[in-house]
Image (cartoon, helix red, strand yellow):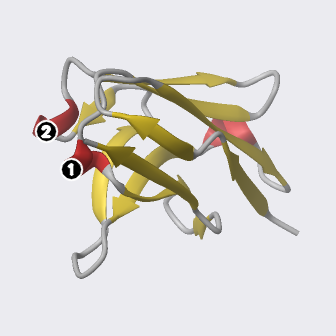
Amino acid sequence: QVQLVESGGGLVQAGGSLRLSCAASGIIFSAFGMGWYRQAPGKQRELVARFTRGGSTNYADSVKGRFTISRDNAKTTVYLQMNSLKPEDTAVYYCNAFSMFYDYWGQGTQVTVSS
């Protein structure tokens, strides 16, 4: 059974930092691309950052220079370090694991940035 369990969300003031973690189980972690998406109220889910299956990274323009995605294959965990947070970063953040044939999602973790 595949599980993606996010943690690390919470309430933070603007300018602060949070580190999200996503622990994966039930997949061959190193064979999957891993990413973070977010969905704000009334908006569509959007890509925040991801590792492609080839190992390169993609970032949304709105988070470039502020967020950093990383992964630890030994711990089967992907991280999102979020610095200089803004109120517009407020959303539910979802972990995603993808391959050519499979696409898995976590339950999400709430990030709220107060002004």
Q: Is residue 113 above or below residue 82?
A: below
Secondary element type, mark 1:
helix
Left or right of 11 on screen, residue 87: left
Q: Amino acid at mark 2?
A: Ser
Q: Is residue 46 above or below residue 76?
A: below
Point out the residue furthest to the left here. Answer: 61
| The disc label shown at residue 58, or none | none
In the rendered image, the quadrant that contains the N terminus is: bottom right
Q: Residue at x 49, y 60 (%)?
A: 100
What residue does disc 2 label?
62
Left or right of 6 on screen, residue 25: right
Q: Residue at x 21, y 33 (%)?
A: 63
Secondary element type, mark 2:
helix
| Closer to the camera in the image, 89 or 29 | 89
What residue does disc 1 label?
88
Please tell me in which quadrant of the rendered image residue 97 appears.
bottom right
Question: Are the residues flagged by discs 2 and 1 in contact, CB closer than 8 Å?
Answer: yes
